[in-house]
Image: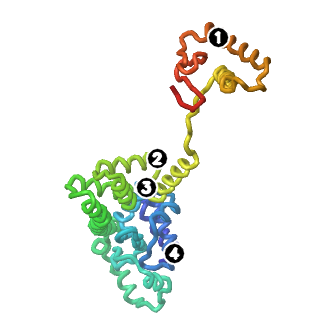
Amino acid sequence: MNYLKEMKAFYNRIIFNPLSGSAVALWHTLMHFNNLSGWQERFTVTNIMLMETSGVKGGSFSRAREDLIENGFIMVEPQSGSQSPIYQMISQVYVFDQTGAAVKPVDDKVSKADDSVDNNVDRNAGDSLADNVVNNPADNAVPLYKVNNKQEKKQKDKQTKTIHKQQKAFSSSAISFFENNFGKANSFTAKEITGWVNDAGEGLVLHAMKRALELDRKSWGYVKWILNDWLKNGLHTVEAVNAEDLDNRSQLRNRGYQHKREVVPDWFTERKQAMSKLEKGQSNPMDPEATAAEEKEIAELLAEFKKGSQSGTRGLTPCPAHPGLFNAGKIYTYESSRIF
């Protein structure tokens, strides 16, 4: 292909047959990859690469590709499983017969021959044709726009049949996967699966089906819920979904387990310390190291607690094990760390 000629022919054509901005961007991207492949007649490139390079993603990508197929700019041959589709660019540079009618797209060989036209053409035949056209304009003149419209109509009809075949091929694997794992797909479900494949892409639909199976939800309704949730969160590719899953798992690991902590008031801690001293004194009544000062301190603490129980423990429940301890809800004893 001649890159410049193809671009000129492409823009001349879309003047009267406009394409969406997404379709134009996708065409340029496909031409770029076809150029990188050395202008091979058929080449493969992943949908992810096309989306990232063209900036056309999700449903817009599927619609743009269908638009190019429908209007005769490209041909797409889907592959089974996760293999990339095979693309073929359709030349927009035409050769014309003696009436001025477009005959067929020019391939590389014809293009090269056209670029180096032999000057030893039969000039007599050319002059004769020119004289015939001049002398009989009414008999020979064919409006160019009518010829082009006729050719485009034939091409559109052909491309329409092609796109129907391709759409059926794209959706057939998704429907087959559904029937093998979920059950028989009625006509309504099959139509919905085909619509989702055309809008979101076959890979994303299959990934949603697998996710539903992992969660033991074997219904098309649940698959649709998954797809809608992904698209709502801007996840238009399988890679984006996997990256989101990885990020969520990482956040859960970093968050860890948060243990609840009981809030113990200061007065309870102070009383615990006092009771420890008291219990220690009671467990060693004959300890020769016990002094009169310690006994006095314990007596003062008991007096203080009794006073506090009369003024500051209204409505509180006394601990059956330690009458000097009160709590509004949970009552603790620190001898065995049990909660009464």
Please tell me whether mark 1 sits on a helix, a strand or a loop.
helix
Please determine whether, in this image, residue 43 is positioned above or below residue 21.
below
Q: Nearer the viewer, mark 4 or mark 1?
A: 1
Q: Say which amino acid is labelled 3.
A: Gly
Q: Are marks 2 and 4 in contact (CB under 8 Å)?
A: no
Q: Which residue is mark 2?
A: 233
Please tell me how crowded label 3 is: few (under 14), some (14-19), or many (20+) other residues with Cα within 10 Å: many
Q: Earlier in the sequence, mark 2 or mark 4?
A: 4
Q: On the rendered structure, is 42 left or right of 149?
A: right
Q: Which residue is mark 1?
A: 306
Q: Nearer the viewer, residue 187 or 59?
A: 187
Q: Which residue is mark 3?
A: 58
Q: CA distance from mark 3 to mark 2?
A: 12 Å
Q: Earlier in the sequence, mark 1 or mark 3?
A: 3
Please tell me whether mark 4 sits on a helix, a strand or a loop.
helix
Q: Earlier in the sequence, mark 3 or mark 2?
A: 3
Q: CA distance from mark 2 to mark 4?
A: 35 Å
Q: Are marks 1 and 3 in contact (CB under 8 Å)?
A: no
